[in-house]
Amino acid sequence: MILEQGDAVQVDHPPTVTLLVHCVNNRAVWGAGFVLALGAKWPECRRHYMAWSTHRDPASLLGQTLFVKVEPHVVIANVCGQDGIGHGSLRLPALEQGLKHVAVLADRLAGPPRHKQVLVQMPRIGCGLAGGRWVDVESILTEVLHRQRVRVRVR
């Protein structure tokens, strides 16, 4: 896993395929934090999230991941790891389940035997407005992505 300074919405150019991961809530609320940068750069990401999360049972969304292809080599992974909004809304088991979906897609995009470059990139998900602790999130990232040999960059 690579921790570095930088803008998490700045992605590598082809041939690298970037899965840009962030943590969303299960209440169809998109209005603060990292989603503002995502929505400004790729407005369709917000539209897809709102259509996906509106009028659904919030409990059914936890642990699910909505993938939105926004450029030929960029896919946004909306990982539903928050039950509600605000400090204390992060649910680590839901975040872990959603990141497992990311790992599966990363493996599929890399192809056999990992002939394509795939990068999972994210900010410190779940540790801002949701109130999670980085040590806990990093442990999940290590277990789910890094140990599966998925390249991870946290900005």
Image (cartoon, rainbow, N blue to C red):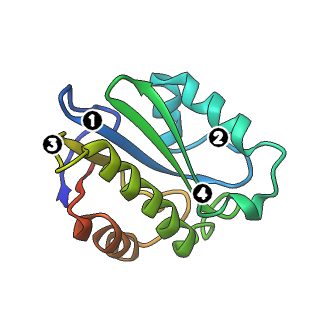
**Which callout, 1 or 4, points at the residue further toward the start of the chain?**
1
Choose between 85 and 102: the one closer to the eye.
Answer: 102
Cα distance in 3D space between marks 2 and 4: 17 Å
Callout 4 secondary element: loop
Residue that label 4 marks: 64
For marks 1 and 2, give the one nearer the viewer: 1
Task: Report the disc number at residue 115.
Answer: 3
Choose between 148 and 155: the one closer to the eye.
Answer: 148
Residue that label 2 marks: 30
Q: Residues within 10 Å of mark 1 (few under 14, many from 20)?
A: many
**Which callout, 2 or 4, points at the residue further toward the start of the chain?**
2
Please name the residue shown 38% across and 42% down the image: 20
Tell me where residue 64 appears, x and y as whole percent: 60, 57
The quadrant where residue 62 appears: bottom right
Tell me where residue 146 appears, x and y as whole percent: 24, 65
**Which callout, 3 or 4, points at the residue further toward the start of the chain?**
4
Looking at the picture, does residue 25 appear above or below residue 87? Answer: above
Cα distance in 3D space between marks 3 and 4: 27 Å
- Asked whether the beta carbons under mark 3 and mark 4 sit within 8 Å of each other, the answer is no
Looking at the picture, does residue 119 appear above or below residue 10? Answer: below
For marks 3 and 1, give the one nearer the viewer: 3
Choose between 33 and 98: the one closer to the eye.
Answer: 98
> Is residue 122 in view?
no
**Which callout, 3 or 2, points at the residue further toward the start of the chain?**
2
Please name the residue shown 63% across and 66% down the image: 89
**Which callout, 1 or 2, points at the residue further toward the start of the chain?**
1
Tell me where residue 72 appears, x and y as whole percent: 35, 23
Looking at the picture, does residue 99 appear above or below residue 134? Answer: above
Q: Amino acid at mark 2?
A: Trp
Task: Report the disc number at residue 17.
Answer: 1
